[in-house]
Image (tube, helix red, strand yellow):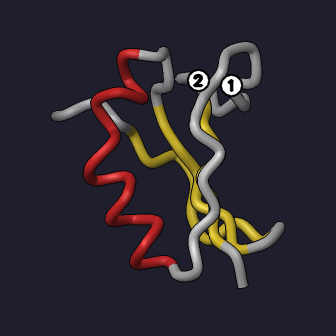
Amino acid sequence: MTWRWRYENARGGEVTDRPLPREVFPSQADAESWLGENWRELVEAGVEQVALLDEDRVEYTGLSLRPE
């Protein structure tokens, strides 16, 4: 199992037009911990929301990076 984040715009389309981290994680917990430490930089780079993928399976999607 490998976990990774898909970076999305506000409409849920994948952001592919800029250099963003392409980290791969051994567990869901590691991926979520990394996001907790790096979400601000992703927002600054234009990412609005993320989806968590386990291999090609979507665990969840539409997770906003904007604080409420």
Q: Secondary structure at mark 2?
A: loop
Q: Residues within 10 Å of mark 1 (few under 14, many from 20)?
A: some
Q: Residues within 10 Å of mark 2 (few under 14, many from 20)?
A: some
Residue highlighted by disc 2: 9
Query: Between marks 1 and 2, how big is the CA–CA gap?
Result: 6 Å
Q: Amino acid at mark 2?
A: Asn
Q: Amino acid at mark 1?
A: Val
Above-or-below relation of 21 to 3: above
Instruction: Tell me whether circle 1 and circle 2 mark residues in contact (CB < 8 Å).
Output: yes
Residue highlighted by disc 1: 15
Which percent across, then down, holds residue 48? Answer: 46, 26
Q: Which residue does the image show at 72% across and 31% down from the upper left?
A: 14
Q: Quadrant of residue 68?
A: top left
Which percent across, then down, holds residue 32? Answer: 39, 65
The disc, 1 or 2, on the residue closer to the chain's N-terminal end is 2
Q: Quarter of the image containing the N terminus?
A: bottom right
